[in-house]
Amino acid sequence: MPIYSLLGALLVLLLIAVADRLQRAHTIKRNFPIVGRFRYWFEALGGPMRQYIVTGNDEERPFSRDQRRWVYASAKRENNYFGFGTDNDLEQSHGYVIIRHAAFPRLAPVSGQPGYDPTYALPCAKVLGGYRQRARAFRPTSIVNTSAMSYGSLSSAAVEAINRGVKIAGAMQNTGEGGISDHHRKGGDIVWQIGTGYFGCRDEHGNFSIDRFLESVASAPVRAIEIKLSQGAKPGLGGVLPAAKVTPEIARIRLIPLGRDCISPAAHTAFNDVSSMLDFIERLADATGLPVGIKSAVGELEFWAELARQIDTTGRAPDFITIDGGEGGTGAAPLVFSDHVALPFKLGFSSIYRSFAERGVHERVVFIGSGKLGFPAQSLLALGLGCDLINVAREAMLAIGCIQAQQCHTGHCPTGVATQSAWLVGGLDPTDKAARLANYLITLRKDLIALAHACGELHPALVSLGRVDILDGLARRPAREVFAYEPGWGLPSAADQAAIHTALADALAARVATHNPAVRH
């Protein structure tokens, strides 16, 4: 009898394992049948047991338990509310963001009322490429988009999920510097990032090739070009994709040799100072008609002062500037670079914005913020500081299944997001995760709109920095004072503020015409 019981138990386990591998909703269970179920049990028990063991809701880094729970719940369209009040100790916190709501908030339509938009469309206040009058200038339809994450660093399934997800949400995907892959061609608009390795637009010696650049632009739905100077994860440092991770597909996409380490140098060879960089930007824009911008973490401030001066005196300008905070982190890096090189976002961005505003050239570029900004309060502060768009990276990874295992640099990401292991990648279903990413992006927009309405404004870009305070224990300082901003800085121009109302009405009309709610499981 015992042998039959054992065989019966093994059969049940086998059936459970098969069911786990065949289901597509949970990557961990799919990649680790039976064993993966423990993760969900522990997660469910986390709340009740936390008063006795393990860390608190806000102790983990880089993202706390509360932050991860909010992303997961938003991505799955589950209840993302929190009960019993805040568990943050506001009066003992330093650098804590407080939004001062209006006494008379703005009323907003709800489901079933005229004007309600289930996609929470949130177009940009500025036209990308508008100042330089690029032939293919456009107004981004979403102020929240996904940040630079390369195919090779991320898996094929993860890249595809993000591309399909931004399509659903009406957003854009930044390719990262690894080139445009087939997985970026699933219907979503892309911002093609070009790094120091010129992947996808290089000659046999690794130098920039205009012919291959034009071929790549023509091959995909590229809306803008981003020239990467540096990133928050490893500012001022090049990168290496080990030979073991250079598959035939990656070699084809990047135009690199198979079987050899793929090197991204620390600096560009197509330009070497501000003036030649601006010439390079104009060359790419003239050849394609596309908006062309730059991305950088903030180190030396002299570069930015010189860039503002040349924009002012020569009229040449990047169409957009993406500022990445030193706390950014999708790229694997030496500990000293991730911990100690480049300013954190709030300090870095405000320094750059001030130098441009003092020159009077801040309205000539679209500013994009990146670096742990994928949460409503942080996004609203970034918009108040002068950002026009928000890019999210790790938060997008969480939305498609990342569990913050911090195994990105090992190639053994258990959720199939940051690995090239066929078994682990096979557990990530792009269609299911695309819907989750779209849900997260739309929820972030929804909460930004709710905050704007609470402050009495129609659009979050119209919420003045004067609505934000920074707490340091029992001391309260206005954010404008903390960041040394003049009145009016951080807000769109009068013309752009007027255009927001028209853009929102047009976005709603377009959504009604398509009858596509764009929000799904």
Image (cartoon, rainbow, N blue to C red):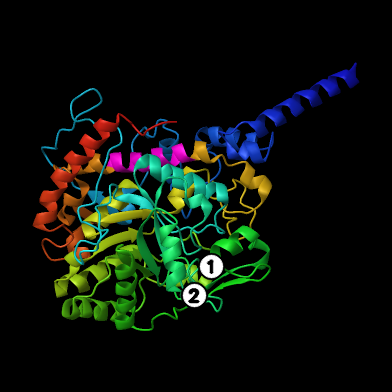
Residue 102 covered by magenta stretch: no
Residue 440 covered by magenta stretch: yes
x, y percentage for residue 126? 20, 56
Q: Amino acid at mark 2?
A: Leu
Q: Amino acid at mark 1?
A: Ala
Magenta span dominant secondary structure: helix
Give the vertical position of 236 relative to 386 (above or below).
Answer: below
Q: Residue at x 41, y 79 (%)?
A: 270
Compare marks 2 and 1 and give the one earlier in the sequence.
Answer: 2
**For residue 503, side relative to residue 369 (left or right):** left
Question: Which of 293/2 is in front?
Answer: 293
Q: Which residues are magenta?
A: 434-447
Disc 2 is placed on an element classified as loop
Q: Which residue is mark 2?
A: 237
For label 2, count other residues whose C-alpha is less than 10 Å away and answer few (under 14), some (14-19) or many (20+). Answer: some
Q: Residue at x 47, y 55 (%)?
A: 62
x, y percentage for residue 399? 46, 43
x, y percentage for residue 95? 30, 58
Residue 474 seen in this snapshot: no
Q: Residue at x 73, y 25 (%)?
A: 15
Q: Are marks 2 and 1 in contact (CB under 8 Å)?
A: yes
Q: Which residue is mark 1?
A: 333
Residue 45 seen in this snapshot: yes
Give the vertical position of 115 relative to 232 (above or below).
Answer: above
**For residue 299, side relative to residue 365 (left or right):** right
Q: Quadrant of the C terminus?
A: top left
